[in-house]
Amino acid sequence: MSTATLNSPPVIGSRRAQPSRLLIVLAFFAIYVVWGTTYLAIRFAVETIPPLVTAGIRHTVAGLILLAIAWSRGFRPRREHWIAGSALGALFFLVGHGSLHWAEQYVSSGFAALLVASEPLRILALGAAMGQQRINWKNGLGLLMGLGGVAILTAPELTSRSSLTVGIIAVLVGAASWAVGVCVSPRLRLPRDPIGR
């Protein structure tokens, strides 16, 4: 065996291991069923528990579980992580989900989900305003079509039940807060791995 062979680094395949099709299907199932039923679960919860208490319990339990997982992997948050995490927590969960929980006292779970589904439109518009991305004719057209679609789908609700206005505004404020969180998070000093590895 030559010296060149001994000193040369091992050749590593450029192809990464592909996840199995079953895992992909299960991941989509989790997104559509577990995440999709969140709005219905919130609706049932706020009928008996104050909305902000519901949101607080939900997010505190989830946060403690994730912190325990990260801690077990050796992650020790620094001061800047706590500051950035608190800012994003306020945007995502206090305002974003807090207003959603409150709004579902007044709007149906399906209608709330529809309004939140327009969130990517806000992220695109805000990202463009912050100079993070450009709106070209393709995503601009998509933005207009998305806004038009939401307007068409929500118009019957608005005209038939004017009492929903406060709930609708609350959902939209929460979605806007979530969009702000998405756009400012790259500028904050966060851990490289969100699970703390």
Image: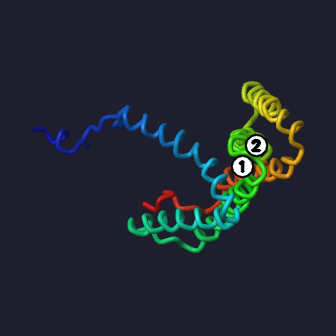
Colour mode?
A: rainbow
Q: Position of residue 51 (x, y in %)?
A: 70, 62
Q: Which residue is mark 1?
A: 179
**Secondary-structure class at tag 2:** helix
Residue type, label 1: Ala
Observer able to see residue 71: yes
Which quadrant, please, contains the N terminus? top left
Cβ–Cβ below 8 Å for labels 1 and 2?
Answer: yes
Q: Earlier in the sequence, mark 1 or mark 2?
A: 2
In the current view of this chain or complex, which residue is farthest to the front?
A: 48
Q: Of 14 and 4, which appears nearest the observer?
A: 14
| Residue ID for mark 2 | 122
Q: Residue at x 56, y 46 (%)?
A: 35
- Residue placed at 42% from the left, 36% from the top? 24
Q: On the picture, is 21 further left or further right than 122?
A: left
- The quarter of the picture where the C terminus appears is bottom left
Q: Would residue 132 be seen by someone viewing this image from the given angle?
A: no
Image: 78 above or below 21: below
Residue 84 image point, x, y percent: 64, 65
- Where residue 72 appears, x then y in whole percent? 39, 68
